Amino acid sequence: MKYIKGFLSWISIIQVLVSILFTVICFLLVPRIFGYKIAYFSDVDYDFEAINAVTGIISGVVLPILLVFLSAYIANIFEKKKQVIGDLNIATIEHVEKIKEDILKTIDQKPQVIDGGFFTAEEEIKNRKFKEKAYKFVCTSMIVNTHSVAEHLGVSDNEAFLILNELLRVDGTISCGGRASIDNIDNVVWMKKRN
């Protein structure tokens, strides 16, 4: 955006310079086309009163008219820039409102945990309670098999194995004897991890 603003200011400067150049061309080249030439002769007597009259007319009449048009032109440029800035501000406000609505819609939806799958908050709390209950049971029983933990939690052997496996591999709070795999559920034993 910074570069665009700089570019637009250069365009404005170029437009003013072109206007000045056009004015110079009108006052120097057009008279030359019609046969008037600027000639410097040393033996010519210059009538300074005539020169003063011409410059007085130019500075008193032509220059103020040009300045009025130039100031109106520059004011028009500033007005256009104000309009562009206003349009951009309105677009920004609309965009912020759209983002705000999207965020509010997202907040109103049920929260989901995306950690190994889609779990709602209630399922995550239920899973955490099962893990705590299984950990306490393993700690109080010293050595326990998967089926005993499943009976204590009131879940199937596979679900109990998944909970115990998470306590083993993720939390690191228990250890196991035997190969901890789904096909070896009946042979693996669980115990509290020694520090």
Image (cartoon, rainbow, N blue to C red):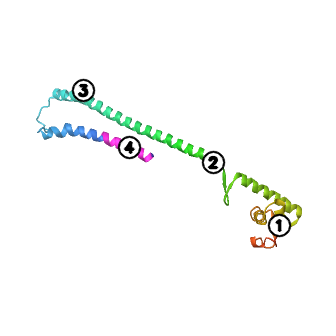
Q: Nearer the viewer, residue 101 or 32?
A: 101
- Could you say which disc has been placed on residue 147 in the image? 1
Chain part drawn in magenta: 2-16
Comes first in the chain, label 4 or label 3: 4
- Three-letter residue code for mark 4: Leu
The x, y position of residue 39, in whole percent, is: 13, 39
Q: Nearer the viewer, mark 1 or mark 3?
A: 1
Quadrant in the rendering for residue 169:
bottom right
Q: Residue at x 13, y 41 (%)?
A: 33
Q: Is residue 97 above or below residue 146?
A: above
Comes first in the chain, label 1 or label 3: 3
Q: Residue at x 34, y 41 (%)?
A: 13
Comes first in the chain, label 2 or label 4: 4
Residue bearing the label numbered 3: 60
- Tell me if 36 is positioned left or right of 110 in this view: left
- Could you say which disc has been placed on residue 109 in the image? 2
- Three-letter residue code for mark 2: Gln
Real-space Cα separation, disc 1 to disc 2, in angstroms: 38 Å
- Tell me if 120 is positioned left or right of 193 in this view: left
